[in-house]
Image (cartoon, rainbow, N blue to C red):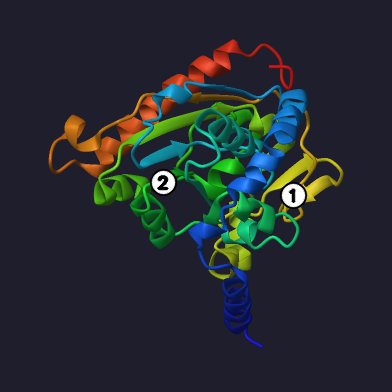
Amino acid sequence: MAPGGLRSIVAAAVSRGVPRADLHERDPDFLRDNLAFLWLLASFWHRGEVRGLDNIPEDEPVLLVGNHSGGNMIVDTFIFTLAFSTYFGVERRFYQLAHDLVVSWPIFGPLLRKSGTVAASHENAEKALESGAALLVYPGGDWETHRPSWHGDRVEFADRMGFVELALKTKVPIVPVVAIGGQETALFLTRGEHIAKALGLDRMLRLKVLPISLALPWGLNIGDFLSHFPLPAKITVQVLPPIDVRKRFGARPDKRKVYEYVTGVMQVALDELAAERRLPLVG
């Protein structure tokens, strides 16, 4: 079989395995029953700290735009979701976009979907915001979460401006969310983007990287497909004030200027969080 035919078969199989976005799959009772234990776990292992939740508008849909870290074990998302649900209550609709492979993961996928995680797509994003929910997106995707550990204090969205288009189309404010510590949960060595391209993973699995890291329990971890056990790095998350795009940039905003402004304020905040840290893992 030709390589192109194999890639098409694999891509089709993965696509069939991705659950359709059902906003009703989010289960407030599941969150309510497990919130206290999970927050205790996050507080003990990662000393999770989330600041500025009062910057999130309470009575309107909102687009939360975050940097994220930690390979496929994205603990900053986990901690932020717990803090959001604790602060606003589990009844407030809150969804997070994730890669197809995450929501279709046999073990954790169903639990994530109960927590509000849906497959990342423009259709699902618009559906969530039109329902009046808060929506968390990570423009950097696999490119950012698998960046080398020494890039842990950088916002790396790779010029992906879809979140700007989404905010303009749905007329919702952008609330930046910055997090630090996730790239210390393992030693991330390289994204492996050239290997991923050579293997055609972008076309098969929508993966632009084949990361290589040193992580528990595997030692040398290639791809992070089975995820890893995170080291107990301190995770700090900062929510920044909301940005009304049209109010700040006019009726017909330049998307590039909006992108640069949002990533700029996020980088300044991330620099401040980085300056607070004294030691890896310890924070």
Give how far across and how far down residue 129 sits, in percent: 37, 50
The tag earlier along the polypeptide, 2 or 1, is 2
Type of amino acid at the residue the image marks with label 1 = Ser
Mark 2 crowdedness (10 Å alpha carbons): few <14, some 14-19, many ≥20 = some
Whether tag 2 and tag 1 are in contact, CB under 8 A, the answer is no
> In the displayed image of the protein, which residue is found farthest to the bottom?
1
Residue matched to label 1 = 227
> In the displayed image of the protein, which residue is found farthest to the left?
251
Mark 1 crowdedness (10 Å alpha carbons): few <14, some 14-19, many ≥20 = some
**Residue at the spot x=67%, y=36% of the render?**
35
The tag on residue 133 is 2
Between 108 and 277, the residue placed more toward the observer is 108
Residue 257 visible somewhere in the drawing: yes
Would residue 62 be found to the left or right of residue 277 on screen?
Answer: left
The tag on residue 126 is none
Whether 41 is drawn above or below 32: the answer is above
Disc number lying in front (2 or 1): 2
